[in-house]
Image (tube, rainbow, N blue to C red):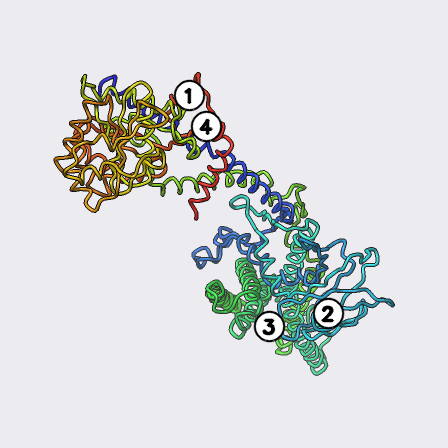
């Protein structure tokens, strides 16, 4: 591509872009109307939309899970492995607890969300909360699965009473006293600080429905990984109510955690009480046995007698007591693990090995977590099934460690007893009474030690039961921002403005895409670059202005002068022989007769011109020029007639213009136009006139005009803007290629002012001329433009 071609390509591209922009911009009033409508809709939407606010709070969860490294570091269990899943992120688990349905149900009932006061407005309803004239709660719902909600108009009555009205009946009640209805029982309380005022409506809703709504509206988030902080947020229309909901949710969470801790402490206290009861009975029996032994053997004090002999085995006895205590505790817990269900908690902090205490603490924590999960999930839930497996695995691990501890303690006790037996040989000389007495005394010491130990643990359990601290700390109470999060006014108006701009563009794009008509010279030149467009005839406005007058200086007349000037570069006149200008079109209604008539009138201003009507089927010259009934067809039909002059008439307005009309409509126009006599017509008339303008029939409809192309020096092919279909361009190209062969030039008729080619429109017809027709067009231009636009949809 050389420089010239590249420059032409750039100019064409810029011109196409400019044309496209102008094509859309000329509908600017439509854009303004759509934008105003869109912004008005957005304003109405914002006016009657209740704003929503974001409420946030943060909660610190105190972790209690034992670390795996601490358990594995214990000497007795250093070779054992914990089952998978015991070490979990407690904070993740607490997210489910915070959004559990029992917890949310308590929030709904505590705040009284199931009873609302509604103030009716003309366009929107307003829910009253802190300024509600009454508050209440649903006590009983007769059919919880079927009942959803109910609304009444509430009217205050005298003597602290009220009246509920619905479509069917009215119900009389009193504030502070439960009221039975057909769906259940409700209690309302009067807020004496607030006056009823406008009509107020009572709305009661099933708490289960509110729980689901609350669950969907609350968002929980852990801002950082491995963090113990939980962010709680909620979007709502009433900031005060949202803050109350979030704060109450945190309070209910702490209350629920304290209840779980109390359950564990209570289980330990009950176990200790049961063991104390048994130990007390056993200790009383041993003391009675000791007393009976002394009385029957008349022994006052054996200690002084056996002091030296027992000194050697005192340490052994002490060791045996410690081991027996541990064995008793291990046996007791082992008995519970063998007989208890998976949901029973195990006692902790009983002096057993620290590793066992840690495992039992983990086991109790998992049981409590499972019980909380079952409040909102079924036993078949995958999480519950996994918890059951983990609990069973941990319980089995505890049982195995208890058995191992039992075996170790029993082995140590056996070894210690052997040592005692060896030492007993040294005191074998003592009386049998002393040996039996020592045996009784050892049992008494063992039971006393166990009894005191259990008393200490019971006190510790009582303290833990009465001094439970909250599981979570409220870091930031609920706080609501002053600016609403929805709706965003700027976003609404931006979207409305964009839609107001894009909708008409989209509509125009569809209309333009479906439009198959020719509108301007650009489209013709783009499709038919080899065929010249010699003229653009502007819209005349009406029939009166569609004929060029004498000394006419309008843009309409000037367009024909420009057309003829351009045509002279195609037609080379020969002296003494008149050029034949043939005017035709593809179909009827494109304005060929208008073009041929005005072309003849313009030429006749200084030349001798003949206007020949060759459209024998549907002659239209009579619309513009008055002539006789006989014409060309009458001449051609009469074989004996050789004088064509008698059929020619002179135009009244201009002596230089003669008219040979079509004449009577014949039955065989094609035959007549292809006859030898037609040849004689052109041969004879060419020598008498300077120009011959021939008005012919449309080429696409009939074949008449094809026989006349051979006589033409120029074929003006008329196309009408916004009327001629683009498919006609292909037919025009065929006519040029097969018939006209260089004679064809296109005239675009009835061009709207906006489609006049750029330079003509910007600089052309107005310079130095009166524009009366333009003044007429200005009066109706927008009326026609909008009419044409809306006609696209009809």
Which of pointers 4 and 3 lies earlier in the amino acid sequence?
A: 3
Q: Name the residue under label 4.
A: 773
- Measured in 3D between alpha carbons, the distance from the residue under mark 1 to the one under mark 4, in whole angstroms, is 10 Å
The answer to whether 134 appears left or right of 632 in the picture is: right
Please report whichever mark, 4 or 2, sits nearer to the chain's N-terminal start.
2
Q: Sequence order check: which comes first, mark 3 or mark 2?
A: 3
Q: What element carries label 4?
A: helix
Q: Neighbour class for label 3 at 10 Å: few (<14), some, many (≥20)? A: few
Could you tell me how far apart the alpha carbons at marks 2 and 1 are, in whole angstroms?
92 Å
Question: Mark 4 Cα within 10 Å, few/some/many (few <14, many 20+)?
Answer: some
- Residue at the image position 78 percent from the left and 68 percent from the top: 163
Q: Answer yes or no: do the residues labelled 3 and 2 have beta carbons within 8 Å?
A: no
The secondary element bearing badge 1 is classed as: loop
Whole-angstrom CA distance, mark 4 to mark 3, is 77 Å
The residue that disc 1 covers is 553
The CA distance from mark 3 to mark 1 is: 87 Å
Q: Residue 331, percent across and down? A: 55, 71
The residue tagged 3 is: 146
Report the side of 197 relative to 396 (left or right): right
For label 1, the crowd category at 10 Å Cα-Cα, with few meaning under 14, some 14 to 19 and many 20 or more, is some
579 vs 703: above or below: above
Relative horizontal placement of residue 760, taking residue 95 as reference (left or right): left
């Amino acid at each position: 591509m050389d420089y010239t071609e590249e420059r032409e390509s750039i100019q064409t591209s810029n011109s196409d872009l400019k044309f496209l922009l102008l094509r859309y911009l000329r509908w600017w009033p439509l854009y303004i109307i759509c934008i105003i409508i869109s912004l008005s809709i957005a304003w109405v939407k914002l006016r009657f939309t209740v704003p929503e606010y974001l409420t946030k709070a943060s909660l610190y969860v105190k972790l209690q899970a034992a670390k795996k490294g601490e358990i594995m570091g214990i000497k007795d269990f250093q070779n054992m492995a914990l089952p998978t899943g015991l070490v979990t992120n407690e904070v993740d688990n607490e997210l489910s607890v915070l959004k559990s349905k029992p917890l949310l149900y308590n929030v709904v009932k505590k705040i009284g969300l199931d009873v609302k006061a509604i103030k009716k407005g003309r366009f929107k309803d307003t829910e009253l909360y802190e300024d509600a004239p009454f508050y209440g709660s649903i006590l009983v719902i007769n059919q919880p699965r079927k009942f959803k909600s109910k609304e009444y108009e509430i009217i205050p009555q005298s003597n602290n009473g009220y009246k509920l009205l619905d479509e069917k009946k009215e119900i009389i009640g009193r504030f502070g006293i439960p009221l039975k209805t057909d769906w259940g029982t409700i209690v309302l309380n009067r807020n004496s600080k607030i006056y009823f005022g406008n009509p107020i409506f009572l709305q009661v809703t099933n708490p289960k429905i509110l729980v689901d709504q609350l669950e969907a509206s609350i968002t929980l988030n852990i801002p950082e990984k491995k963090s113990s902080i939980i962010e709680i947020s909620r979007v709502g229309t009433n900031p005060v109510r949202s803050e109350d909901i979030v704060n109450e949710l945190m309070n209910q969470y702490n209350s629920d955690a304290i209840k779980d801790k109390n359950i564990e402490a209570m289980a330990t206290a009950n176990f200790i009480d049961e063991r104390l009861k048994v130990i007390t009975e056993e200790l009383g029996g041993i003391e009675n046995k000791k007393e009976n032994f002394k009385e029957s053997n008349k022994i006052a004090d054996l200690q002084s007698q056996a002091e030296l002999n027992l000194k050697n085995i005192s340490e052994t006895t002490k060791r045996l007591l410690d081991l027996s205590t541990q064995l008793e505790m291990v046996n007791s817990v082992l008995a519970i693990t063998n007989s208890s269900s998976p949901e029973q908690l195990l006692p902790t902090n009983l002096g057993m090995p620290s590793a066992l205490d840690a495992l039992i603490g983990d086991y109790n924590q998992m049981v409590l977590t499972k019980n909380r999960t079952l409040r909102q999930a079924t036993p078949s839930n995958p999480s519950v099934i996994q918890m059951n497996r983990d609990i069973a695995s941990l319980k089995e691990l505890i049982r195995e460690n208890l058995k191992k501890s039992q075996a170790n303690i029993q082995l140590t006790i056996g070894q210690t007893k052997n040592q005692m037996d060896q030492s007993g040989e040294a005191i074998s000389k003592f009386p049998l009474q002393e040996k039996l007495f020592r045996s009784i005394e050892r049992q008494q010491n063992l039971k006393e030690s166990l009894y005191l130990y259990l008393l200490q643990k019971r006190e510790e359990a009582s303290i833990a039961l009465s001094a439970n601290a909250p599981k979570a700390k409220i870091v930031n109470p609920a706080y609501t921002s002053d600016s609403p999060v929805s709706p965003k006014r700027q976003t609404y108006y931006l979207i409305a403005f964009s839609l107001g701009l894009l909708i008409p563009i989209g509509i125009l794009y569809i209309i333009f895409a479906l439009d198959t008509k020719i509108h301007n010279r650009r489209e013709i030149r783009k499709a038919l670059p080899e065929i010249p467009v010699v003229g653009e005839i502007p819209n005349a406005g009406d029939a009166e202005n569609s004929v060029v007058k004498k000394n006419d200086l309008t843009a309409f007349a000037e367009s024909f002068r420009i057309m003829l000037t351009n045509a002279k570069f195609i037609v080379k006149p020969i002296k003494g022989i008149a050029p034949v200008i043939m005017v035709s079109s593809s179909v009827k209604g494109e304005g060929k007769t208008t073009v041929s008539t005005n072309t003849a009138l313009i030429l006749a201003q200084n030349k001798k011109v003949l206007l020949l009507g060759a459209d024998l089927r549907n002659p239209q010259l009579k619309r513009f020029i008055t002539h006789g009934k006989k014409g060309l067809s009458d001449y051609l039909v009469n074989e004996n007639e050789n004088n064509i002059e008698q059929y020619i008439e002179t135009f009244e307005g201009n002596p230089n213009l003669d008219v040979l009309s079509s004449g009577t409509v014949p039955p065989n126009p094609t035959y007549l136009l292809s006859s030898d006599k037609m040849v004689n017509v052109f041969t004879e008339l060419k020598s008498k006139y300077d120009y011959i303008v021939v008005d012919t029939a449309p080429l696409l409809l009939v074949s008449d005009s094809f026989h006349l192309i051979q006589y033409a020096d120029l074929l003006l092919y008329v196309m009408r803007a916004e009327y001629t279909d683009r498919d006609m361009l292909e037919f025009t190209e065929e006519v040029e290629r097969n018939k006209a062969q260089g004679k064809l030039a296109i005239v675009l008729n009835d061009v709207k002012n906006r489609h006049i080619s750029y330079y003509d429109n910007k600089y052309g017809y107005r310079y130095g001329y009166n524009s009366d027709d333009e003044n007429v067009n200005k009066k109706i231009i927008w009326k026609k433009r909008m009419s044409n636009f809306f006609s696209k949809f009809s």
